[in-house]
Amino acid sequence: MPILLVFALVAACLPIDWPVPPFAPERETAAALTGGSVALVLALAFGLRTWVVVTLRRDPDRRIEVAQAYGRCRRLLFFVNIGAVAACVLSFGWGWLVRSQLQVQWNGESQLAPFAEFAVPLPYFVVLVGCWVIYYDAERALYHALHVGRRVFWPRHAYLLHNARQFLLMVLLPVGLVVTQQTLTRFAPETTRTDLYRAASLAVVPAMLLFMPLLLKPLLGLQTMPPGATRAHLEALAQRLNFRCTDFLLWPTHGAAVNALIAGLMPRVRYVVFTDRILEDLPQDELDAVLGHEIGHAKHGHLWFYAAFLALSLSVLAALGLLVDQQLRASDALKRPEYEAWLKENETWLALPPVVLVACYLFVVFGALSRRCERQADVFGCKSVSCGNPTCTGHDAATVFPPGGNALCPTGIRTFARALERVGEVPPPAAPEPWTLRRVVREARVWARHWLHGPVPHRVAFLLSLIERPAAEPRFQRRVFTFKCGLMLILTLALVALGETVGWRDLLDVM
Ligand SMILES: [Zn+2]
Ligand SMILES: [Zn+2]
């Protein structure tokens, strides 16, 4: 979801001449329709919250059903919220209002004020914060119903801060970079045309990738994992697998999240993060398997590969855009007066298709790459808790684990699969149904939701199948290797071919 949001917000911040409201008086109409839409979606959120709270109070036994319905409705309302704000910007004149009102004089010209782009998606920010405030009660009621006798849910301000921090890091930071770039282009156009500036703006992305982990700790409020048995155990495993990182961090979420992640490309600025609840919910062997999965990402060089893939892909897409632009300009078809008039009127809208294209490309191609890498990390997670006996029936205190994590045994696979199911919070498997249109739609929705990792039941089924067919594991590794090499080869060839066609200097200028 965050990635869709990033692209939607970037699109809203583009220098587009948004249309005027449907009727006069324009300013009042835009403000009233936008305010009304925001109030409406907040009312929907309040309705959902009230249903959850009241139903759980009346009938706590329905907690599972309520939790599932709440999750479904919230996912649906996420799209409703985006749709409502898109309608405000596109049809109700909110985008026009912001762009026409927030003007300043600069060098004798009227310009959009610095960072005023953020005001275009402002209705979304209002809806978002409003939803956090409203859903808090529903989340608290659900938490207490599902985890009877456990700790209390966190206070409202801490819940708001937790959500705001994630939003700031995952969504607002990348959008902020785009807005900063546009502000500089408006107010210091000469500077943005120098080679030094271009080189610096290209270097921002790798610099962020390298040093982002340092920001992660203060931005998300992460803490060093306290010394103790758990930490010592994880450190010993990291040592056995020859893995180095700066620190193991604890993410206090008041039990809201069962998750772990790795951040950082180099051992000196690399962290492995565990949420509080994953440390509480998972037994030690499963925690080891989860750490093994995160280490697997580092051992297979996934983060480096992602960085190279994104850099190459964005260069190829930029070159592709340039090629289309050059071809259109050269063709006679567009020189006809009716096209030229149309183009002049709608020129600013041409900023939109590239954003949609990049979003679709990432969803399809990066999704396919990421799901394969997740599976590779899953297999490494199994290996990290496997002994050297490929037919073992269980592990005990005397079990010897090979250094480096190169073996695969049934117990290791089962341990990791259990951890995955617990982290994914998957419901018990339902009876298989025939392929109807309904099932196809549902499966497509599940895959779309898990586009980065793949659905947990599929991942678990693949891992368990390796118990019966150990030879499938090296085959799988070879397939992923071929996929990665092929992808990089295609992208490199495409970049060279496109660069030669459009001219490298011109390509550098549009980057
Ligand atoms: Zn992973
Ligand atoms: Zn074993």
Image (cartoon, rainbow, N blue to C red):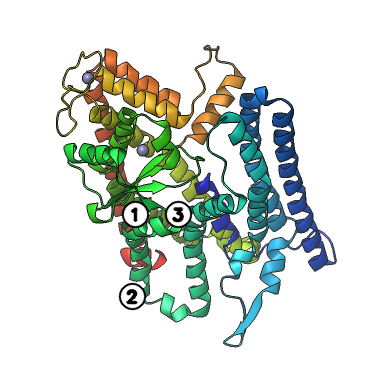
Task: Return the residue nearer the eye: 271 or 256.
Answer: 256
- The amino acid type found where label 1 is placed reads Ala
Task: Give the mark nearest the N terminus, 1 or 2.
Answer: 2
How dense is the environment of label 3, judged by Cα within 10 Å: few (below 14), some, or many (20 and up)? many
Q: Which mark is residue 220?
A: 3
- The amino acid type found where label 2 is placed reads Leu
Asked whether, in this view, residue 398 is left or right of residue 14, the answer is left
Task: Return the residue nearer the eye: 192 or 323.
Answer: 192
Mark 2 residue element: helix
Task: Give how far across and how far down residue 229 sits, in percent.
Answer: 28, 38
Task: Give how far across and how far down residue 313 sits, in percent.
Answer: 37, 50
Quarter of image, res 75: top right
Query: Where is 232 relative to 204, above or below?
Result: above
Task: Give the mark nearest the N terminus, 1 or 3.
Answer: 3
Indicate which label's residue lies in the foreground, 1 or 3: 3
Indicate which label's residue lies in the foreground, 2 or 3: 3
Task: Give the mark nearest the N terminus, 2 or 3.
Answer: 2
The answer to whether marks 1 and 2 mark residues whose Cβ atoms lie closer than 8 Å is no
Residue at (27%, 26%) from the top-left corner?
476
- The amino acid type found where label 3 is placed reads Leu
Q: Which residue was labeled with disc 1? A: 311
The answer to whether marks 2 and 3 mark residues whose Cβ atoms lie closer than 8 Å is no
Q: Which residue was labeled with disc 2? A: 196
Residue at (33%, 60%) from the top-left corner?
211
